[in-house]
């Protein structure tokens, strides 16, 4: 008797995204390697080890990446966790190294005791405690530290979600939900966008970023339907090509004004999402406040959120830096207008003619649009170059 396996498709909410501020600007005083994360995510099957923990046969899992990031291989914390959970310190080391994962009972206990590994919780979330400095005054720098509860929630998602695609979606949603409350508690206006790298083109290099997820609060909408491509002239493109956190503010009079800014956008911060020296995309935080990114603690916080996003990505989402050769793309407003008018019809037509699923047809259309937009932008640059000598001649007459 043959037994046939049927893959079940998980229904996930549709993703909506938006695009971001462009061109730079100001590198933040922070390298992306400030909090390096261990390399590797794997979806390979697990085996059982002697202590009954679940042992992945591949590299470190998102859970081990986050655990190592949180305790930073501090032996005193490893010993404390082992004592609190009731396991050996070698078992905790295996969890950190990704050679095994805790059983459900150990996982529950770990999630209970892990927050105590931090001396001073710092969060703007409801019910949080404000850190106090040596002079007995509120510590404004600590106010921008990523709340430890977010790490705990992301660790939980990484540990309990089996499907790779679902894990990524849940982790991104969790991070964006908490980050909006943390970075803009008074709701003065903010949007978060994750822009992923597009697949390599025919020449083997990557030409643009594509908005993959966006969440906002007034004056931005909660989400946008029409996503755009971000090229080399954008703030996100600069952060991707140089692998550094970059900021822009309307108050920076000497900085070059970004192209295609959102009308609500008065300052922005872009941080590359990396792991093991490879790039998956860029996290962009846009604010309606002129001075939001001028606080040096803000770029650091955005960089930490980018590290957390990296933990939710799959290995296939990351690409070697040597392949990132971004090119200019058209204005975001022009892109959105064209996409809104043609995108859905093109996907349906492509699926019908090529006998493809909607998802497969959508990927084909995204690649075609990227190529068309690149050629459009290149054509405009060539036209401007041809017109420049004429304008100069007229000026001398």
Image: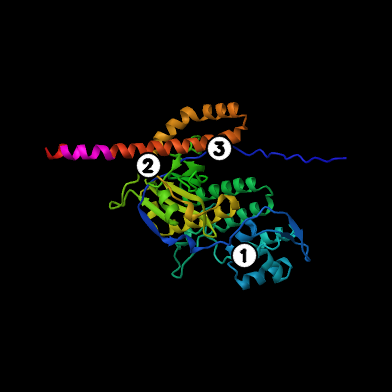
Residue closest to the eye, 100 or 105 = 100
Q: CA distance from mark 2 to mark 1?
A: 42 Å
Residue closest to the eye, 257 or 276 = 276
Q: Nearer the viewer, mark 3 or mark 2?
A: 3
388 in magenta: yes
**CB under 8 Å between discs 3 and 2:** no
Q: CA distance from mark 1 to mark 3?
A: 45 Å
Percent from the top left, x then y, of residue 103?
74, 59
Label 3 sits on residue: 363
Percent from the top left, x then y, of residue 188?
43, 45
Q: Nearer the viewer, mark 2 or mark 1?
A: 2
Tell me, what colour scheme is on the image?
Answer: rainbow
Quadrant containing the C terminus is top left
Of the numbered discs 3 and 2, the one sitting upstream in the chain is: 2
Magenta segment: 385-393
Quadrant containing the N terminus is top right
Image mark for residue 261: 2
For label 1, count other residues whose C-alpha is less than 10 Å away and answer few (under 14), some (14-19) or many (20+). some
The answer to whether residue 143 is left or right of residue 116 is left
Q: Main secondary structure of the magenta part?
A: helix
Q: Secondary structure at mark 2?
A: loop
Image mark for residue 116: 1
Q: CA distance from mark 3 to mark 2?
A: 27 Å
């Amino acid at each position: 008797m043959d037994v046939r396996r049927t893959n079940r498709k998980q229904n996930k909410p549709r993703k909506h995204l938006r695009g971001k501020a462009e061109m730079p600007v100001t590198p933040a005083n922070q390298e992306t390697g400030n909090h390096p994360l261990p390399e590797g995510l794997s979806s390979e099957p697990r085996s059982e080890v002697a202590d009954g923990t679940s042992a992945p046969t591949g590299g470190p899992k998102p859970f081990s990446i986050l655990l190592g990031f949180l305790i930073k291989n501090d032996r005193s914390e490893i010993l404390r966790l082992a004592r609190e959970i009731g396991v050996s310190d070698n078992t905790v080391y295996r969890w950190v190294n990704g050679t095994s994962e805790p059983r459900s009972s150990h996982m529950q206990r770990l999630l209970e005791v892990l927050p105590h590994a931090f001396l001073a919780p710092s969060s703007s979330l409801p019910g949080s405690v404000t850190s106090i400095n040596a002079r007995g005054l509120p510590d404004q720098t600590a106010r921008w530290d990523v709340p430890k509860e977010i790490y705990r929630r992301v660790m939980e998602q990484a540990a309990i979600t089996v499907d790779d695609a679902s894990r990524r979606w849940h982790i991104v949603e969790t991070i964006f939900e908490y980050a909006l409350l943390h970075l803009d508690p008074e709701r003065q206006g903010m949007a978060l966008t994750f822009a992923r790298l597009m697949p390599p083109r025919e020449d083997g290099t990557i030409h643009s970023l594509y908005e993959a997820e966006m969440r906002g609060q007034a004056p931005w909408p909660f989400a946008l339907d029409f996503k755009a491509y971000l090229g080399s002239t954008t703030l996100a493109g600069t952060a991707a090509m140089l692998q550094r956190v970059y900021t822009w503010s309307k108050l920076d009079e000497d900085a070059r004004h970004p192209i295609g800014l959102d009308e609500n956008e008065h300052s922005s911060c872009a941080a590359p999402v990396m792991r093991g020296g490879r790039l998956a995309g860029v996290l962009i935080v846009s604010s309606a406040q002129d001075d939001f990114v001028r606080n040096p603690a803000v770029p650091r916080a955005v960089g930490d959120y980018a590290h957390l996003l990296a933990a939710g990505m799959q290995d296939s989402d990351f690409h070697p830096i040597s392949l990132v050769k971004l090119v200019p793309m058209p204005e975001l407003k022009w892109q959105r207008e064209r996409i809104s008018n043609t995108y859905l019809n093109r996907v349906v037509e492509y699926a019908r003619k090529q006998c493809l699923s909607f998802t497969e047809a959508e990927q084909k259309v995204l690649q075609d649009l990227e190529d068309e937009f690149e050629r459009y932008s290149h054509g405009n640059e060539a036209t401007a170059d041809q017109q420049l000598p004429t304008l100069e001649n007229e000026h001398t007459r």
